[in-house]
Image (cartoon, grey):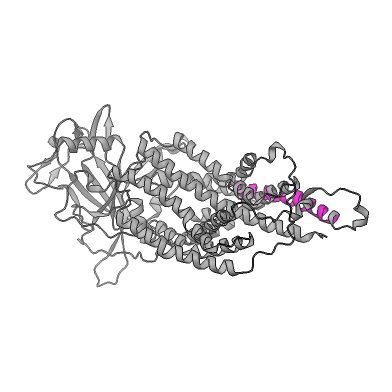
């Protein structure tokens, strides 16, 4: 076992080297060099909360505004995530300190919040909103220091540092609301090596903030917009009373520090995860599961099959008197086309489309091409790839439809191109209406929706038709035995051959191989964390494919031995059994990890979870179906049938 661990470790180190998000510049994201006193622009991205799951744009709250508000042009992924990147009035210059400066209005004229604005801010503080800013494309982070559970002597020396994305809008004390109205920015720069006679150049490598709440009376401001911060002990926080108007000053300070971190590894701070150990454990656990499965498979199936095939192929005269039993009995019915062949081939076509998309996305991300620094790149890539993979989905669906004796290929192609994407679009549209009603930036704007529809009907649909046409014209899959004209009767099945029992049995092993990775993916989606361990994810995906294929072969073998030849739909349903466990896990995660209480956030969570479960079922069902189909064709090709 230790040898196995060592081998695994080498493989993973190799993969992690491959996936180095920090080892080279991501295409399209080049470093920006600053000289002394150059302006460093601070932009706002959005406000987020894991309690409501509704992002809002920065100026939905009455923050100080610049003279001209300009929004950055965004890619598809950013729009779908709810990012609305906009300029802010913070004046920050490279390597120039600022003790304390008033952000807007004149110092002797504080900002007055109306009752409505005060109510809104208090509401957002209660909902635990975070503000996300960026400087030179680096997101702002709040430093959290805490003592880890180490020995007492070590405790005194060393604190553990972790970073929280963004900063809290404010905090509550009892029933009172306090707003963080002073921001202390700490920016770290790396001095680049230059020729002797050139100006020194700097690059921003970290962006931290310490938010503070300071009462208006304690912020002493003069005519030049400068202010003095009170002593830490004697200052009172800035309360926001939602029942009346509030007066306050928005202020900020800037502090620069030199850092040894190079520009290429500046994202490491955000991506440091204390749980890499868990990933190792998860991978070893998954590999053990797969070896365990392979062992069962090779022992039971291969030994039994060899015996079966040897028996079946013996001279007939010896065994004429013996009654045939087992899977050979159903040879005349095993390739009988199932009910609804068009829907089955359409769902499998969408499964192939998803499989190709996920495989390419994870592989490209593992090579570091889709690092978090290129915002929204992952989602944009996934959308476009799904559209372009339509040609493969169409091809496989068309060929299978032909094999299942289907004739209406145009209708089949239309069904493949619209069935799964139509369900996804329908659910997203309904959820989007609710998000629109909340005026959240997470709502997909109407032009983007039209663009997505154009991609669907302008790229995906024609490609599916093209693939379907060629798949349908190609020679159908070669089935090794002929189908009888009269279907044979199926004996009564035992209780454990029930579909639902099959789904429960078949789902547990593939789910067990990947559920730890699922936890990190859920945290990334629902708790605004970064997910970047695509090297691990790629391995887990391979393990998932192998375990789904194996379990599907075992299930179809037992079914044929019970003389039940209706395996087409059943294999597709049973192989996707792990999607049922993903649904159970999502409910567990909602109850235990998330603090969601309102109706619309809950609806969003379960709406998007339903989409994930549906996609996962299509993916695993397709993998299992093709594995089982190849297996069935192999075993019937190996026996001599009169």
Q: Residue at x 14, y 54 (%)?
A: 67
Nearer to the camera, 466 or 119: 466
Q: Residue furthest top?
A: 174
Image coords of residue 202 (percent x, y): 28, 62
Residue 182 horizontal side relative to residue 260, left or right: left
Please report the bounds of the magenta region as a residue range.
285-310
* Residue 287 is inside the magenta segment: yes
- Of the pair 84 and 431, the residue shown nearer to us: 431
Q: Is residue 444 left or right of residue 227?
A: right
> How many numbered tags mark residues here?
0
Residue 434, magenta (yes or no): no
Question: What is the residue that sits farthest to the front in this orientation?
Answer: 486
Residue found 80% across the figure and 55% down from its top: 306
- Check the image and report above or below for 61 versus 543: above
Task: Work out which quarter of the rendered image holds the C terminus and state it.
Answer: bottom right
Percent coordinates x, y for residue 371 in the rendering? 41, 58
Q: Give 171 or 118, whichever is nearer the viewer.
A: 118
Residue located 44% across and 44% down the image: 523
Query: Quadrant of the rendered structure where residue 135 is?
Result: bottom left
């Amino acid at each position: 076992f230790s040898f196995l661990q060592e081998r695994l470790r080498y493989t993973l180190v190799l993969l992690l080297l491959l996936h180095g998000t920090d080892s080279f510049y991501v295409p399209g994201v080049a470093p920006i060099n600053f000289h002394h006193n150059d302006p460093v622009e601070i932009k706002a991205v959005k406000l987020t909360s894991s309690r409501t799951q509704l992002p809002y744009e920065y100026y939905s709250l009455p923050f100080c505004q610049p003279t001209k508000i300009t929004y950055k042009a965004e890619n598809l992924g950013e729009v779908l995530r709810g990012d609305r990147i906009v300029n802010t009035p913070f004046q920050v210059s490279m390597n120039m300190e600022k003790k304390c400066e008033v952000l807007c209005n004149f110092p002797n004229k504080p900002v007055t919040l109306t009752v409505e604005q005060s109510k809104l801010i208090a509401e957002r503080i209660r909902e635990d909103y975070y503000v996300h800013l960026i400087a030179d494309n680096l997101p702002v982070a709040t430093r959290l220091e805490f003592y880890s559970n180490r020995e007492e002597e070590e405790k005194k020396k060393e604190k553990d540092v972790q970073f929280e994305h963004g900063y809290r809008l404010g905090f509550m004390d009892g029933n009172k609301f306090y707003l963080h109205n002073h921001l202390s920015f700490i920016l770290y720069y790396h001095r680049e090596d230059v020729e002797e006679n050139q100006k020194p150049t700097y690059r921003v490598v970290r962006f931290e903030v310490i938010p503070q709440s300071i009462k208006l009376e304690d912020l002493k401001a003069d005519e030049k917009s400068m202010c003095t911060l009170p002593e830490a002990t004697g200052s009172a926080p800035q309360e926001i009373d939602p029942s009346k108007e509030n007066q306050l000053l928005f202020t900020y300070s800037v502090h620069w520090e030199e850092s040894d971190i190079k520009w290429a590894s500046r994202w490491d701070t955000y991506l440091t995860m204390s749980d890499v150990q868990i990933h190792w454990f998860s991978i070893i656990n998954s590999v053990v599961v797969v070896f365990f499965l392979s062992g069962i498979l090779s022992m039971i199936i291969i030994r039994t099959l060899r015996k079966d095939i040897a028996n079946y192929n013996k001279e007939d005269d010896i065994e004429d008197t013996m009654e045939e039993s087992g899977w050979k009995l159903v040879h005349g019915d095993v390739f009988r086309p199932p009910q609804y062949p068009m829907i089955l081939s359409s769902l499998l076509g969408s499964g192939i489309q998803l499989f190709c998309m996920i495989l390419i996305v994870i592989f490209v991300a593992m090579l570091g091409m889709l690092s978090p620094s290129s915002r929204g790149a992952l989602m944009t890539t996934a959308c476009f790839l799904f559209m372009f993979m339509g040609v493969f989905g169409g091809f496989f669906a068309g060929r299978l439809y032909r094999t299942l004796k289907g004739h209406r290929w145009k209708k089949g192609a239309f069904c493949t191109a619209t069935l799964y994407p139509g369900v996804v679009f329908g659910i997203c549209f309904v959820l989007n209406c609710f998000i629109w009603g909340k005026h959240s930036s997470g709502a997909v704007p109407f032009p983007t929706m039209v663009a997505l529809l154009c991609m669907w009907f302008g790229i995906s649909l024609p490609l599916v038709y093209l693939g379907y046409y060629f798949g349908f014209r190609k020679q159908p899959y070669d089935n090794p035995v002929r189908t009888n004209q009269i279907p044979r009767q199926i004996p009564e099945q035992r209780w454990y051959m029930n579909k639902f029992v099959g789904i429960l049995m078949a789902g547990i092993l593939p789910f067990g191989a990947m559920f730890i990775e699922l936890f990190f993916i859920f945290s990334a989606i629902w708790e605004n964390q970064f997910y970047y361990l695509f090297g691990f994810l790629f391995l887990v995906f391979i393990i998932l494919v192998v375990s789904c294929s194996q379990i599907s072969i075992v299930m179809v073998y037992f079914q044929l031995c019970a003389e039940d030849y209706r395996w087409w739909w059943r294999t597709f349903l049973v192989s996707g059994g792990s999607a049922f466990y993903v649904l159970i896990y999502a409910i567990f995660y909602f109850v235990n990890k998330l603090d969601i209480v309102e109706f619309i956030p809950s609806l969003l969570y379960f709406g998007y979870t339903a989409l994930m479960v549906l996609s996962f079922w299509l993916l695993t069902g397709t993998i299992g179906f093709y594995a089982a189909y190849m297996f069935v064709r192999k075993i019937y090709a190996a026996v001599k049938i009169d």
